[in-house]
Image (spheres, rainbow, N blue to C red):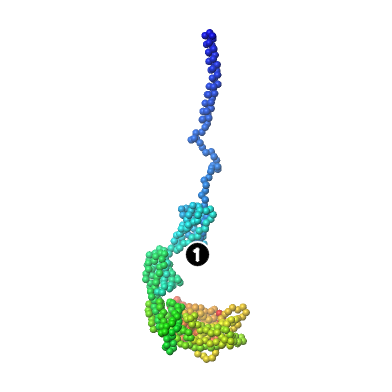
């Protein structure tokens, strides 16, 4: 091949190769541009945004809660109003009790373990809740008063009521059980109790959570001997306080060859001592004045043999004898339970009471199907007495017929006092009032009378009169006045 042909062939080959290379170059150029476009359209990490609609945002899980209910009260069950209950560790969850002491806590987290409870005047308390659970829980709470307590007792350890207890500037009165209370803030103060009869106790520093006992010293003493009417000692008898400021109602059964007795630990004041023995009616001494801590010896009580009262119990309508009626002497005073004087009527309605007090006696007669009757008789009169009982009407409850002034009496350290008068009865009509102190009966001074003495003198035959002297507060409110009231005895039913 000549040189010129070779050159032309080479030029043609180069041109052909160039033509073949053009599409490949264009493809490469185009692909790179697309990649740049796609790269430009792809978001960078810093440009990423959450385009999820707000309603589709995922919610955080809520904390699970429960409800706690219950009541806050004192140990005796008294509800406490206005107590604050707070969930420990969750101060925002709290409530107060209502007038019935009840509360309701809502939204209490399951993680809560205790409640804290407080109320004014009470010691706070912490209450454990149960294990976490989803249902409601019941938790009652007892709060104790923030106070100091104690007791006032006499020399024997018996409670002393209605005495003044002073602690610093505070002053309270002991209750019927001898207990007293002061606010808790009084802890550490020096307390004592004072009584006009018993004196004053030693001082005691009050401490919380301790039985603070204020004790009076040894009281007074009354001692003596019981004899019969001949002066010989009565070796078996019962003795006790009929009236007085302390130990009223206490009885001492004595077995002593010399007839001696001794009543100890007595408060100061005026006493009437009663004694009785089987077959011998009770005897009550005159007034005995006892100073604080005084020892009074030499008291002599004479028990007589007593009188015999015989009678018959009859039906009021047909005067038929009533068998099995019970007859009891009333007004035996403090020793009636130890030495009752009683009898039961026989087939003829007859009865005999041995050992009744000379003078006058009041008896109660009762039988099934009849109204009971209380009557007064003179024991010195001879012959049998008749007691008439009226049959109960159909459907009538058991009642008692009395003959007297229709007043109730009771013994006090100040004397025998009118405890009450029956509406429309002779005493009320005559002007007798509850609280009147009996000072005389038929002009005889009643200073040393017992209740039994007064009852026996006020009872009597229907239509007879009795004059009752009484003392009562003056209308002006200062001092007292004494009145004599005439009362016509009547029969009344109670």
Which residue: 53% across, 45% down?
A: 59
* Residue under pointer 1: 77
Query: Which quarter of the image is occupied by the N terminus?
Result: top right
Quarter of the image for residue 56 reads top right
Q: Residue furthest right?
A: 394
- SS of the residue at dot 1? loop
Query: Which quarter of the image is occupied by the C terminus?
Result: bottom right
Q: Which percent across, then down, holds residue 122?
A: 45, 62
- Observer-nearest of 465 and 287: 287
Can residue 51 be seen from the camera position used here?
yes
Q: Residue furthest bottom?
A: 382
Which residue: 38% across, 72% down?
A: 201
Can residue 459 be seen from the camera position used here?
no
- Observer-nearest of 450 and 353: 353
Against 454, residue 19 (above or below) is: above
Against 419, residue 65 (above or below) is: above
Which residue: 52% across, 52% down?
A: 65
Q: Horizontal placement of 224 versus 13: left or right?
A: left
Q: Which percent across, then down, holds residue 190?
A: 37, 67
Q: How many marks?
A: 1
**Dot 1 alpha-carbon crowd within 10 angstroms: few under 14, some 14 to 19, many 20 or more:** few
Q: Which percent across, then down, holds residue 325?
A: 57, 84
Against 297, residue 40 (above or below) is: above
Which residue: 55% across, 19% down?
A: 20
Q: Which percent across, then down, holds residue 62?
A: 52, 48
């Amino acid at each position: 091949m000549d040189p010129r042909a070779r050159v032309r062939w080479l030029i043609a080959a180069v041109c052909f190769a160039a033509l073949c290379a053009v599409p490949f170059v264009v493809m490469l150029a185009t692909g790179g541009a697309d990649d740049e476009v796609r790269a430009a359209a792809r978001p960078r990490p810093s440009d990423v945004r959450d385009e999820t609609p707000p309603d589709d945002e995922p919610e955080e899980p809520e904390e699970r809660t429960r409800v706690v209910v219950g009541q806050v009260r004192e140990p005796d069950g008294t509800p406490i109003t206005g107590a604050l209950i707070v969930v420990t560790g969750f101060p925002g969850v709290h409530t107060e009790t209502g007038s019935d002491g009840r509360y309701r806590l809502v939204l209490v987290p399951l993680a809560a373990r205790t409640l804290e409870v407080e109320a004014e005047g009470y010691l706070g308390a912490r209450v454990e809740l149960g294990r976490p659970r989803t249902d409601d829980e019941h938790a009652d709470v007892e709060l104790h008063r923030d106070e100091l307590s104690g007791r006032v007792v006499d020399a024997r350890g018996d409670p002393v009521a209605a005495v003044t207890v002073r602690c610093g500037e505070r002053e309270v009165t002991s209750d019927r059980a001898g207990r007293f209370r002061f606010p808790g803030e009084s802890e550490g103060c020096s307390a004592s109790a004072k009584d006009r009869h018993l004196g004053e106790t030693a001082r005691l520093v009050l401490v919380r959570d301790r039985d603070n006992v204020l004790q009076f010293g040894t009281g007074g003493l009354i001692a003596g001997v019981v004899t019969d009417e001949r002066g010989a000692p009565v070796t078996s008898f019962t003795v006790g306080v009929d009236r007085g400021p302390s130990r009223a109602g206490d009885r001492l059964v004595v077995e002593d060859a010399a007839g001696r007795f001794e009543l100890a630990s007595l408060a100061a004041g005026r006493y009437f001592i009663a004694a009785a023995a089987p077959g011998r009616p009770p005897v009550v001494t005159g007034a005995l004045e006892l100073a604080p801590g005084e020892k009074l010896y030499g008291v002599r009580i004479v028990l007589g043999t007593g009188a015999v009262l015989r009678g018959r119990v009859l039906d009021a309508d047909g005067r038929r004898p009533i068998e099995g009626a019970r007859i009891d002497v009333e007004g035996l005073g403090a020793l009636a339970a130890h030495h009752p004087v009683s009898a039961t009527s026989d087939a003829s309605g007859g009865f005999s009471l041995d050992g009744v007090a000379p003078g006058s006696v009041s008896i109660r007669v009762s039988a099934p199907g009849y109204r009971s009757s209380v009557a007064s008789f003179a024991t010195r009169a001879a012959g049998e007495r008749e007691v008439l009982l009226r049959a109960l009407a159909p459907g009538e409850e058991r009642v008692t017929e009395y003959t007297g002034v229709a007043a109730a009496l009771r013994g006090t350290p100040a004397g025998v006092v009118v405890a009450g008068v029956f509406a429309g009865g002779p005493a009320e009509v005559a002007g007798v009032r509850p609280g009147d102190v009996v000072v005389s009966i038929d002009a005889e001074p009643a200073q040393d009378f017992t209740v039994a003495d007064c009852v026996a003198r006020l009872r009597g035959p229907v239509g007879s009169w009795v004059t009752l002297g009484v003392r009562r507060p003056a209308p002006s409110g200062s001092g007292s006045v004494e009145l004599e009231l005439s009362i016509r005895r009547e029969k009344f039913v109670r």
